[in-house]
Image (spheres, grey):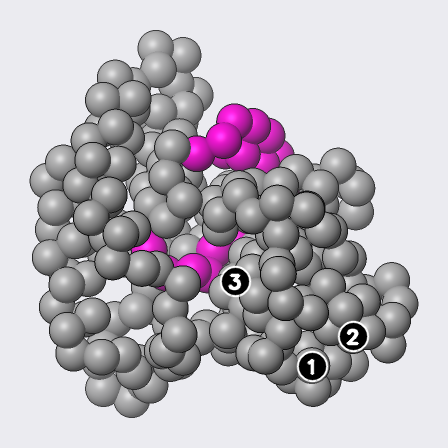
Amino acid sequence: MKACIVIPCYNEAGRLREDVFLTFLDRYADIDFCFVNDGSSDDTEGVLQSVSAKREGRMIVVTYPDNQGKAEAVRRGFLHVSALHSYDAIAFADADLATPLEEMKRLIDVFERQAGVVLVMGSRIERMGVVIRRKLYRHFSGRIFAAVVSVLFRLNAYDTQCGAKVFAPRVVEEVFHEPFLSHWLFDIEILLRLRNRYANYNEIIHEIPLDVWIEQGNSKIRPLHLLKMPGQLLRIFFKYRKRDKDCIG
């Protein structure tokens, strides 16, 4: 199975780990990358072009002049890759590789084994024998957020916000056809779009606990973004509260 991982990039020139990406490509001939340069003001474009030239044909670089936010970068990246009609699975991960590429490979393998599944999503569940590292306050704020999402949207996902997801190409148009309401909460919208389209969404979406996830710091989320999130949650709620009547079983 051939897969492509979309990586949204905004001012990532100092964090992109060239050696990690190149080593991964050499190890796995069936996985490519699509880097989306979302209007970066640093040398992200130059770094991406330099790295992609070292593995020609394995790294797609898509550049937009103006910063549109992570949600739009991911959306455009998916539509670009989908239009190539070259991949059996399309994933996305964060440029800081908090979810290591080997974990992305594991999610892709799970996706390949699960017939009929349209989305495999990673989740950060702390348990014995794994490495899940993030600041304590972020862990607890994340659990509170997850509880709010569960009550507000009746989604039983443990971790909607984990930046590691693998999709079937056949649902890309349905999920990414229109812009998301929120730059940072678009993962919730992804699940709601699938739920509102497929009556059996609980069977075709699989949540897989990650074995490794390491917080990298330098989060792009600012205090102003956090202040806007309650309002964005309400906008999402009112937009998706009614399920489509033409759900597919």
In the picture shown, does residue 15 fall above or below 1? below
**Range drawn in magenta:** 160-180
- CB atoms at circles 3 and 2 under 8 Å apart? no
Res 80 quadrant in image: top right
Taking depth in this image into account, of 234 and 224 the one nearest to the observer is: 224
Marks 1/3 in contact by CB < 8 Å: the verdict is no
Across and down, in percent, residue 81 comes to 71, 45
Image quarter (top left, top right, bottom left or bottom right) of the N terminus = bottom right
Q: In the rendered image of this protein, does residue 93 appear above or below residue 38?
A: below
Q: What residue is rendered at 33% in x and 64% in y?
A: 123
Which percent across, then down, holds residue 96? 50, 73
| Labelled disc at residue 18 | 1
Which mark is drawn over residue 51?
2
User: In the image, which is nearer the foreground, mark 3 or mark 2?
Assistant: 2
Q: Position of residue 217 (x, y in %)?
A: 37, 78
Tell me which amino acid carries mark 1.
Glu
Q: Is residue 122 visible?
A: no
Q: What amino acid does circle 2 point to?
A: Val
Q: Is residue 167 above or below residue 15?
A: above
Relative image position of residue 195 (x, y in whole percent): 34, 31
From the viewer's perspective, is 68 left or right of 130?
right
Question: Answer yes or no: do the residues labelled 2 and 1 have beta carbons within 8 Å?
Answer: yes
Is 56 on the left-hand or right-hand side of 144? right
Q: Residues within 10 Å of mark 2 (few under 14, many from 20)?
A: some
Crowd around label 3: few <14 · some 14–19 · many ≥20 (10 Å): many
The image's mark for residue 93 is 3
